[in-house]
Image (cartoon, rainbow, N blue to C red):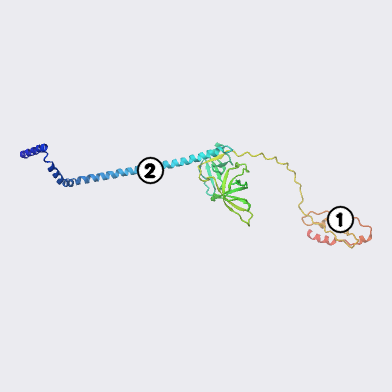
Amino acid sequence: MTVFACISVALLLVDSHMRTLTTVRQVAGTVLYPLQMAALLPRDAIYGVGDYFSTLSSMEKQVRELRRQQILSSQALQQAQLQAAENAQLRKLLDAREHLPVKSMLADVLYDARDVNSRKIILDRGTRHDVTLGLPVIDNQGVVGQVTRVFPFTSEVTLLSDKEQAIPVQLLRNGLRSVAYGRGKAGNLELRFTAPNADIQVGDIVVTSGLDGVYPAGLAVARVTQVENSAGGSFGGVICQPLAGIMNNTQLLILMSTPEMPARPADEEQRPLRKHNNKMAPIKDVPKEGAEGQQPAAAPATPPAAAPAANAAPGLMPVMPPPAPKPAATAPAAAVPAAPAPAATTNKEPAR
């Protein structure tokens, strides 16, 4: 051991002063490198497996966190989009509210009515907010419907497309007046009882006429989408599409007052009706003229008191006979036989 220690010290001194063993060291390192790598393979494999599983678990955690953040971000984005849409709609409603001639109130749509066959919605305004029956409901594009039921904190609005709803309208282009009726589930409106030759075209805008005293005049209602003119029929069919977002709105405007209408004229005094006899009386047979130069005998052969009974028909008012003419002084006139005797016999038969 002492000999080898001395050799080692000598080699260290020689290498430090003369730098003679650098080449030998490089050659030995090059030759022994594969052996070193082969000896380190088990250690590297163990470290690699541990790093793989730790990296996999951390990546899974990161993926879950990113997914949660994505869901939260998407919800926040949807809420932002919804709020942006509501803000845009509110701005439009406020803009429309400034141009309305009457006072209005903003209301939120709570839910649809339970009856699937009707077209109704429920608002969050009621009698506590001075809402009454018959008030019109609109949005920024046109008329939506009318308040038909009122509760303390809510109210029910019947939409224009409901079958029981009707609104007087007129065409914006030429002022032609009509009445728009709802068509139920179809969601459209129909102008009924229009003349086949009426000046109505596809694309015409229909507005309120204001004749009913409920809706202010000039509010947009619908657009004409179909015109059917039947030459053989007495009326034409006109189908309209509502302009208002009837089923798409979350906020609506309730018009708190109806337009002021001129006072109705005072009713005329009712005059007592005269009782008229609507029953018809038979017309007496006019006797035919006799021979030339002779006057027809009136009814001397029949007593005057019996003439009404002879001329009366069942259920009819008898007619009083005219006064009998005085008998002529000449003998030939008195000798003429009575002409109406057969007629009297005929008229007595229905009186049984």
Q: Earlier in the sequence, mark 1 or mark 2?
A: 2
**Residue placed farthest to the left in the image?**
3
What x and y, as percent, mark residue 101? 59, 38
- Where is 263 relative to 318, above or below? above
Observer-nearest of 13 and 246: 13
> Which residue bears the numbered disc 2?
70
Residue 153 appears in the figure? no
Real-space Cα separation, disc 1 to disc 2, in angstroms: 115 Å
Q: Nearer the viewer, mark 1 or mark 2?
A: 2
Q: Please indicate whether residue 276 sits to the left or right of residue 184 in the image.
A: right
Q: Amino acid at mark 1?
A: Pro
Observer-nearest of 290 and 177: 177
> Which residue bears the numbered disc 1?
304
Question: In which quadrant is the C terminus drawn?
Answer: bottom right
What x and y, as percent, mark residue 308? 83, 55
**How many C-alpha atoms fall within 10 Å of the one at disc 1: few (<14), some, or many (≥20)?**
some
Residue 84 appears in the figure? yes
Residue drawn at the location 53% of the way across and 38% of the way down: 95
**Residue placed farthest to the right in the image?**
330
Residue drawn at the location 30% of the way across and 43% of the way down: 58
Q: Amino acid at mark 2?
A: Gln
